[in-house]
Image: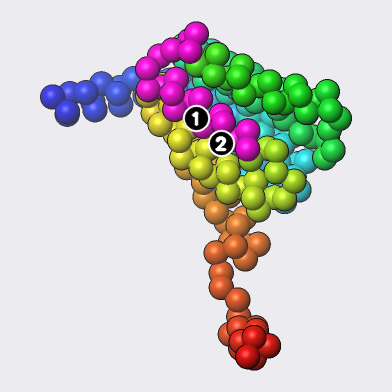
Amino acid sequence: MFFVRRRSMTAFLLDYLPTLTSQSVMLSPVAATGIAGLSAATLSTLLGGRRAILLAQATASSLFLLHFLLLGAQTGMLMCGLGLIQMAVRVRRQPGRALGLLYGLTVPAALAVAALSWQGPMSALSATGFLLATLGRWQSEVGRMRLFFILATLVGSGHNLLAGSVFGLVSDAMGLSGHCIGLWRAGIFRSRPFPARVASDQVAA
């Protein structure tokens, strides 16, 4: 039974990949938007500036909005739209009170979207990932932003799996790798050098 279900899911995913023929390469709209969204999402993880990251993510969200629309994943599509509103607000480092209120209203809007377009676990995972990404976009420090994005990506990958988005899953894998590399380069996962620890211990003594 498990083998049959797994084979069916694989066949479903492969339906959207490019079909090679002797004359041309047929690229479906689902595949085209997925590849473009994947590229923009991967680029966002390689950038160092907060504004640049958000702009690249906005591009990826626009493309994945179309991607999920074509797949019929309504919750994911609407969450991408709300994410675009958030990124438009947070591109400014210090948004005004009105924009801050607009940003906050996207949270109850996301919960309403999940309820109205309920598709079981797929909607629940999409909403949870959106809330984690909401916390990430509000951060002014890139390191904390990346940590929330990692959590959001882990949860969102469940939605992409259930939605049958092979490009979303690849984007998740590359996004996790990119954000982890960014945190490593910033020294988040590395302990302080030995001389620094010694000096700190001497001061404490």
| Horizontal relation, residue 49 to residue 77: left or right | right
Quadrant where the N terminus is found in the figure = top left
Furthest toward the left, the residue is 1
Q: Is residue 154 visible?
A: yes
Which residue is farthest front? 205
Residue 99 in the image: x percent, y percent? 81, 25
Which residue: 68% across, 20% down? 105
Q: Quadrant of residue 103?
A: top right
Amino acid beneath label 2: Leu
Residue ID for mark 2: 132
Disc 1 residue type (three-letter): Thr
Q: In this orientation, which residue lies closer to the viewer: 120 or 2?
A: 120
How much space separates mark 2 and mark 1, taking CA atoms? Answer: 6 Å
Relative to residue 68, is residue 89 depicted above or below? below
Was residue 125 drawn as part of the magenta stretch in this picture?
A: yes
Q: Is residue 96 left or right of residue 193?
A: right
Crowd class of label 1 (few under 14; some 14 to 19; many from 20; radius 10 Å) = some
Callout 2: SS: helix
On the question of residue 21 being in view, the answer is no
Give the residue at x 21% y 23%. 5
Q: If the image is split into quadrants, where does the C terminus sit?
A: bottom right
For disc 1, the marked residue is 128
Q: Position of residue 55 (x, y in %)?
A: 74, 34
Task: Provide the major secondary structure of the magenta segment.
Answer: helix
The magenta-colored residue range is 115-135
